[in-house]
Image (spheres, helix red, strand yellow):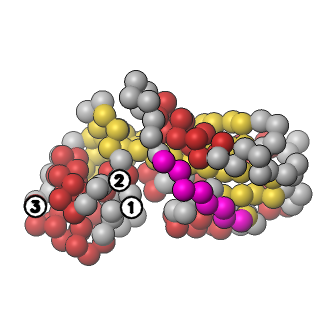
Amino acid sequence: MLKEKLKNINIILASGSPRRQQFLKDLNLDFEIRLKDIDEVYPEHLFAEEITNFLAELKANAFQNELEKNDLLISSDTIVWFNNKAVGKPKNYDDAFQIVKSLAGATHQVITSVCFKTTEQITTLFETTSVTFSPLADEAIHYYLKNYKPFDKAGAYGIQDWIGLVGISKIEGSYTNVVGLPTEKVCSFLLNFVK
């Protein structure tokens, strides 16, 4: 359905995330991947989705003068929002341990922003999902970090991993958002993109 509707649009995914790439494949979309090394720094006064909106747009704007008429660039950013602070990707193993330990037995939000950029317009949308972890023993956290190495993930965990099966007691909102792309909103945007 989407593929036929977007047959004249060249979709470019500006993300190295295997999860995001797989979602677009699962949506049966033809797309290419273009990557740029972006320094993901944002102003300190930004709050929650303002951060992910800013970073998703920062990634898209790096391609400012490279887009053709029929190109649609998709960029995205995800953070874990906990205790009124953004939790990004862990710096190292010890940092990852402290992050997961702090999330255990508590509820946090996962916020993902998606930016759609053409030569003429830029549209950014976001999704927020609440995730509640059960209490986790230190041993379980060490097992997870050693075996699944979630060091490229915001919040130092992947809901689709082992920890999601044993440690997450409740989720309110979009599951795909927690994995890294709110596919429902992406699909809805794309369906309306070509009139």
Instruction: Provide the secondary structure element on which disc 3 rests.
Output: helix
- The residue type indicated by label 1 comes to Asp
Q: Is residue 77 something that shows in the picture? A: yes
Q: Which residues are magenta?
A: 32-39
Residue 32, percent from left and from top: 71, 65
* Secondary structure of the residue carrying numbered label 1: loop
Q: For mark 1, what is the residue? A: 152
Whether label 3 touches label 2, CB < 8 Å: no
Look at mark 3 in the image and give the residue it sits on.
138
The amino acid type, in three-letter code, at marker 3 is: Asp
Q: Earlier in the sequence, mark 1 or mark 3?
A: 3
Distance Cα–Cα, label 3 vs label 2: 20 Å
Which quadrant is the N terminus positioned in? bottom right
Q: Position of residue 179 (x, y in %)?
A: 46, 56
**Foreground pick, 2 / 22:** 22
The one nearer the camera, 27 or 89, is 89
Q: Is residue 104 visible?
A: no
Which quadrant would residue 185 be assigned to in this image?
top right
* Image quarter in which the C terminus is found: top right
Q: Is residue 65 left or right of residue 104?
A: right
